[in-house]
Amino acid sequence: MGDNFNQYEWFRKQRLSEAVSMDALDRLEGLANIRDLKLMKDSLRMVTAEWMQEGFEKEDIKDYISYLIDNI
């Protein structure tokens, strides 16, 4: 995922557009502090890449991140 990452296209490809509308995505991003959101995306990109290099599956990583969110 480089600088050209298109979140809307990614969501469509993952079939999440049915669960999360584009309006909801726009609203979520519009309410977030831009610098905080960029930091979160960059951090997720880095740790996800590291975990995948260590052999973790993307689904396991998603489950772990969901677990973290659920426990906030």
Image: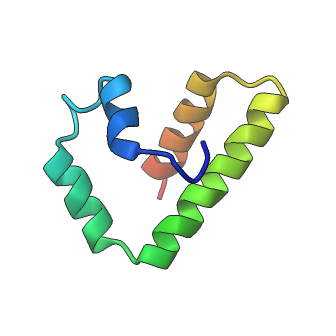
Colour option used? rainbow
Q: Residue at x 39, y 45 (%)?
A: 7
Look at the picture and state if 55 lies above or below 71: above
Q: Position of residue 57 (x, y in %)?
A: 67, 21
Q: How many marks?
A: 0
Q: Position of residue 40 (x, y in %)?
A: 55, 62
Q: Which residue is the extreme one toward the right?
A: 54
* Quarter of the image that includes the N terminus: top right
Q: Is residue 22 left or right of residue 62?
A: left
Q: Residue at x 56, y 23 (%)?
A: 59
Q: Residue at x 57, y 53 (%)?
A: 3
Look at the picture and state if 25 lies above or below 60: below
Residue in the foreground of this view, choosing between 38 and 66: 38
Q: Position of residue 8 (x, y in %)?
A: 32, 42
Q: Is residue 66 left or right of residue 7?
A: right
Q: Is residue 51 left or right of residue 61?
A: right
The answer to which image quadrant residue 30 occupies is bottom left
Look at the picture and state if 5 lies above or below 31: above
Q: Is residue 20 left or right of residue 29?
A: left
Q: Residue at x 25, y 52 (%)?
A: 25
Q: Which residue is the extreme one toward the front?
A: 4
Residue in the foreground of this view, choosing between 9 and 19: 9
The answer to which image quadrant residue 26 occupies is bottom left
Look at the picture and state if 20 lies above or below 31: above
Q: Position of residue 52 (x, y in %)?
A: 75, 30
